Image: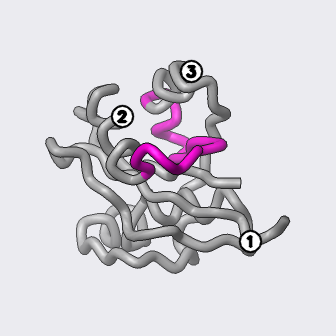
Amino acid sequence: MIVAGFGFRQSASLASLESALEKAAGTTIAVDALATLDRKADQLAPLAQKLALPLIPIPADRLIDQPTLTQSSASLAAHGTGSVAEAAALAALASNARLLAPRSLSPDRLASCALAESLLP
């Protein structure tokens, strides 16, 4: 299973979210679900609906212990994690998951997306 985790600003549009996902997944990786902070899930819901994918809301406290490849000082200060996108993708898959790559940013820098895959069969 592959989950696309998202971090984004309030001003991120559907196009911002889509472009972050496109940069992260390219044309070859099939995503099975989307994930983000629970308090931002409503803003990601239109993309989940458009793609007919489940949306996994992640409580903020589940992001803190996730090992991220990216270390954003703004994200650390606001959310206690180096990357909301990376941490959300990992948290959605429980403990037996790995990031496929560091987060990708939308061209407008309003959204980020990271992919994680479950290591369980």
| Front tag of 3 and 1 | 1
Q: Which element type, helix, strand or loop, lies under badge 1?
A: loop
Amino acid type, callout 3: Gln
Mark 3 or mark 2: whose residue is earlier in sequence: 2
Mark 2 or mark 1: whose residue is earlier in sequence: 2
Instruction: Identify the image quadrant of the C terminus.
Output: bottom right
- As drawn, the label of residue 96 is none
- Image color mode: one colour
User: Does residue 29 belong to the magenta stretch?
Assistant: yes
Q: Which element type, helix, strand or loop, lies under badge 3?
A: helix
What residue sits 55% from the left and 26% below the top? 51
The answer to whether any part of residue 91 appears in the image is: yes
| 115 in relation to 47, above or below | below
Asked if residue 40 lies left or right of residue 12, the reply is: right
Asked if residue 111 lies left or right of residue 46, the reply is: left
| 102 in relation to 8, above or below | below
Q: Which element type, helix, strand or loop, lies under badge 2?
A: helix
Q: Name the residue under label 2.
A: 18
x, y percentage for residue 21? 40, 44
Stretch in magenta: 25-43
Q: Mark 3 points at which residue?
A: 49
Callout 3–callout 1 Cβ contact below 8 Å:
no
Asked if residue 10 lies left or right of residue 26, the reply is: left
Number of residues whose C-alpha sits closer than 10 Å to that of mark 3, classed few (under 14), some (14–19) or many (20 or more): few
Q: For marks 3 and 1, give the CA distance.
A: 26 Å
The answer to whether any part of residue 61 appears in the image is: no
What residue sits 52% from the left and 35% below the top? 41
